[in-house]
Amino acid sequence: MLFKDKSAIVTGGTRGIGREIVMMLAEEGANIAFTYLKSASDAQILVKEAQSRGAKCLSYQVDVRDFDKSKELIEKVKLDFGGLDILVNNAGITKDKALMMMSRDEWLEVVDTNLGGVFNLTRNVIVTFLKQKSGLIVNVSSVSGIIGLSRQTNYASSKAGIIGFTRSLAREVAPYNIRVNAVAPGFIETDMVSGLKEEYKNELMKRIPLARFGNAKDVANSVRFLLSDAAGYITGQTIIMDGGMSLAL
Ligand code: NAD
């Protein structure tokens, strides 16, 4: 078990990639605090599932856009688990639209959730990590933030911002034995992509050398690696898991 007795926070844990990361951490022996936005019943189901793997697991309703609630969360988790070692910033949304049709609210909501959420959680956790001279952070970016995708100026900007945030913070906190990395998934089969039109999915598939969409396990596997001692000399990096999509011309 890679993370026995380590305590971890995962944002947006109830479904998709976040859920898979919670279950991966449970299987690796961590104590897990995950946040959810709305669905208390889904959160309860996941708590039970993680507990059935022998993990200590608690859920907390927190909107990652709320700085003060994020601060309260960190304090609560430290009390509930007696410490904190890992932060996985996973929560994120899309509001895809051509720029000429995009409202200011659609811009702000995506940037505030995806990038603002990373700031809110990390800003509040970093003091603890600096004091204890240890900590591990993985941020969920996207291949969209690297290659750019049409109709995703808001999303791609937020995800590119996460990469810059990751690199800058990694330099800043490396002397305190804190590693900060990111993962950049391509198209992963979750609720976030299930709404895409079939024709668009077929078009996308032609651009993926491995000729399949990824699954949440593909992402959780890279998060596991980045959090493990096997990645002990890796900081400020972004692992792309996109079936080779960003290579294709
Ligand atoms: P999803 O929509 O299934 O899950 C997103 C989670 O974030 C949900 O649990 C949701 O409740 C939570 N969330 C949204 N807004 C929130 C807020 N304001 N406060 C707290 N929680 C909030 O999507 P997913 O595919 O599992 O995405 C997880 C992460 O992976 C996101 O950051 C997403 O941008 C990123 N990502 C996904 C893909 C993909 O193809 N699915 C590709 C690249 C990156």
Image: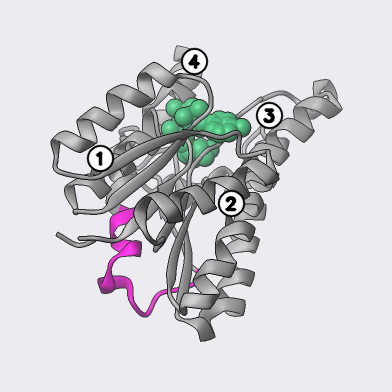
State whether residue 198 appears in this view: yes
Marking on residue 195: 4
Q: Residue at x 53, y 86 (%)?
A: 175
Mark 3 or mark 2, earlier in chain = 2
Magenta span covers which residues?
222-236
> Can I make out residue 141 in this image?
no
Return the residue at label 3.
151
Measuring from the top left, give residue 110's x and y in whole percent. Answer: 69, 34
Number of marks in the image?
A: 4
Identify residue type, mark 4.
Answer: Gly
Judge whether 224 appears above or below 104 on screen: below
Q: CA distance from mark 4 to mark 1?
A: 24 Å
* Identity of the residue drawn at 76% across and 26% down: 106
Q: Identify the amino acid type marked 2.
A: Leu
Q: Residue furthest bottom?
A: 175
Q: Is mark 2 within 8 Å of ligand 1?
A: no
Q: Does residue 1 appear left or right of residue 98 in this picture?
A: left
Q: Is residue 223 above or below residue 198?
A: below
